[in-house]
Image: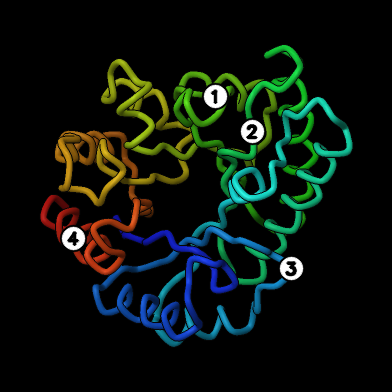
Amino acid sequence: MKIDFYIHTPESPFWKNKEDFEKIINLISLCEYNGIEFFPYYIKKIDVNYIKKLIQDNKLEAICVASGFLNTYYGLSISHPNEYIRRLAIENLKECIIFASKINAKYVSIGLIRGKIIHSSFEDGLKNIIKSLIECGKYAEEYNISLLIEPENRYETSYIHTVQDGIKILEEIGMGNLGLMIDTYHMNIEEPNIEKAVKNASKKLLHVHLADNNRLAPGMGHFDFKSFIKCLKEVGYDSFLGIEVDPLPSLDIAIKNGIKFIKSIL
């Protein structure tokens, strides 16, 4: 299995300047990560050529583009009862697909963009999600991009909390370029049996995110990563493990500690 790290794109206010962004990309490379994932802020302001060159110069592979920023920063969701807001979410999700294609990433993740229940029923929100995913899935096919449905905990979204929830949606949609991404942080909250959940996910599993139970780097909490990775190996998963964590006590430490701990298990 290979390992990647998840960071904000350079136009994000997370970064003081481009130099800080470049230093982190370089550190990720020096720590012998294989790839990188991106959480954008304002996707239309991203300098694609700049990012591609940095990735290439640091011998990294682009893996995934997150769409959650559309909800986090702009309040957009594909479940929203307001058609105008939902349309904005869909069109911006398509921009994420284009960006992913331009940097040669494989995936766009579908997490927080599912949103929460707002002045409508759960059933209506879920119908909107399914319609939106079918439209965006067809669009993503044109760019050879797969959409990753990530089960997330009940405190962050109203929809799709468990692997079984994700499988049910995938089976209902029935598109070949939609699959599952599982995340240990969310699984720790929602799954009664993590080993069983991994086995259930295996046929639809395209990508994996790692974070400890406290959302810190693996090894800085009490999640059982040895058991989890053993289970991934047993089901034949042999793709990327993406470390998505809070940058504490610092981003540098999270980057260094995360890969050191996971490599000690692999």
Q: Can you say whether 201 is above or below 127 in the image?
A: below
Q: Nearer the viewer, residue 215 or 102?
A: 215
Q: Quadrant of the N terminus?
A: bottom left
Residue 44, numbered circle? 3
Residue 242 image point, x, y percent: 37, 53
Residue 260 image point, x, y percent: 16, 61
Mark 3: give few (<14), some (14-19) or many (20+) Cα within 10 Å. Answer: few
Q: Which residue is mark 4?
A: 257
Residue at 35% across, 29% down: 187
Q: Can you say whether 188 is above or below 149 in the image?
A: above
Corner quadrant of residue 198: top left
- Give the amino acid type for the residue marked by disc 1 in the picture: Ile
**Is the C-beta separation of discs 4 and 1 under 8 Å?**
no
**Is the C-beta separation of discs 2 and 1 under 8 Å?**
yes
Q: CA distance from mark 3 to mark 2?
A: 21 Å
Q: Which residue is mark 1?
A: 160
- Left or right, 178 with reference to 129: left
Q: Which residue is mark 2?
A: 114
Residue at 33% across, 49% down: 238
Pointer 2 or 1: first along the chain: 2
**Is the C-beta separation of discs 3 and 2 under 8 Å?**
no
Q: CA distance from mark 2 to mark 1?
A: 9 Å
Residue at 38% across, 32% down: 186
Pointer 3 or 2: first along the chain: 3
- Give the amino acid type for the residue marked by disc 3 in the picture: Lys
